[in-house]
Amino acid sequence: MAITNFQVATTTGSAAFTATADTAVTVIYITNKSNADGTVDVYVTPNGASVTENHLIYSQLTIKARDTYIIDTEKMILESGAKVWIAAPDSAAQFNATISTIGL
């Protein structure tokens, strides 16, 4: 099992996680570190694909001030090269993400 930490930006300039082999994402924690509510978008892209609206799995997910949203209901199986992207394009809040994965 591995843990990846990611500081969420306003753009999808860099991936929050990139699978280097077939991998299961077991949980994603997204924490709002600010005193204001904020929103994030979460995307998952297959190997070689660019981020588009077609890869959006959470759209404008609101996370309350000083709260954490946990994505753990369903496990995501990623092929080598697949990526998880998290961005806060319309939010003044500050977020970080912790992603737990396990190789298959």
Image: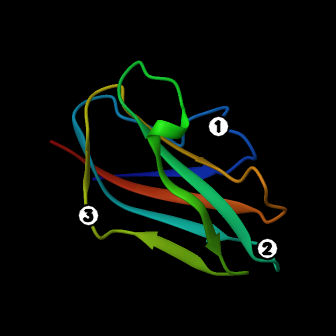
Residue 11 against residue 29 in the figure, above or below = above
Q: Residue at x 70, y 54 (%)?
A: 88
Place of residue 11 in the rendered image (x, y in percent of width and height, measured from the top left)? 72, 40
Work out whether mark 3 precedes mark 2 in sequence or the reverse, and give the earlier one: 2
Type of amino acid at the residue the image marks with label 3: Glu
Front position in the image: 4 or 18: 18
Check residue 81 in the rendering and tell me which mark sits there, or answer none: none
Residue 70 lies left or right of residue 72; in this view the side is right
Residue 93 falls in image quadrant? bottom right
Does the CB distance between marks 1 and 2 fall below 8 Å? no
Work out whether mark 3 precedes mark 1 in sequence or the reverse, and give the earlier one: 1
* Residue lying furthest top: 48
Q: Residue at x 59, y 50 (%)?
A: 6
* Residue lying furthest front: 54
Type of amino acid at the residue the image marks with label 1: Thr
Check residue 34 in the rendering and tell me which mark sits there, or answer none: 2
Q: Distance of mark 1 from mark 2, alpha carbons?
A: 20 Å
Q: Residue at x 49, y 45 (%)?
A: 43
Residue 20 against residue 93 in the figure, above or below = above
Check residue 12 in the rendering and tell me which mark sits there, or answer none: 1
- Judged by depth in the image, the label closer to the viewer, 3 or 2, is 3
Does the CB distance between marks 3 and 1 fall below 8 Å? no
Place of residue 53 in the rendered image (x, y in percent of width and height, measured from the top left)? 54, 39
Residue 72 falls in image quadrant? bottom left
Type of amino acid at the residue the image marks with label 2: Ser
Residue 101 lies left or right of residue 57; in this view the side is left
The residue labelled by disc 3 is: 74
* Residue lying furthest left: 104
Label 3 residue SS: loop
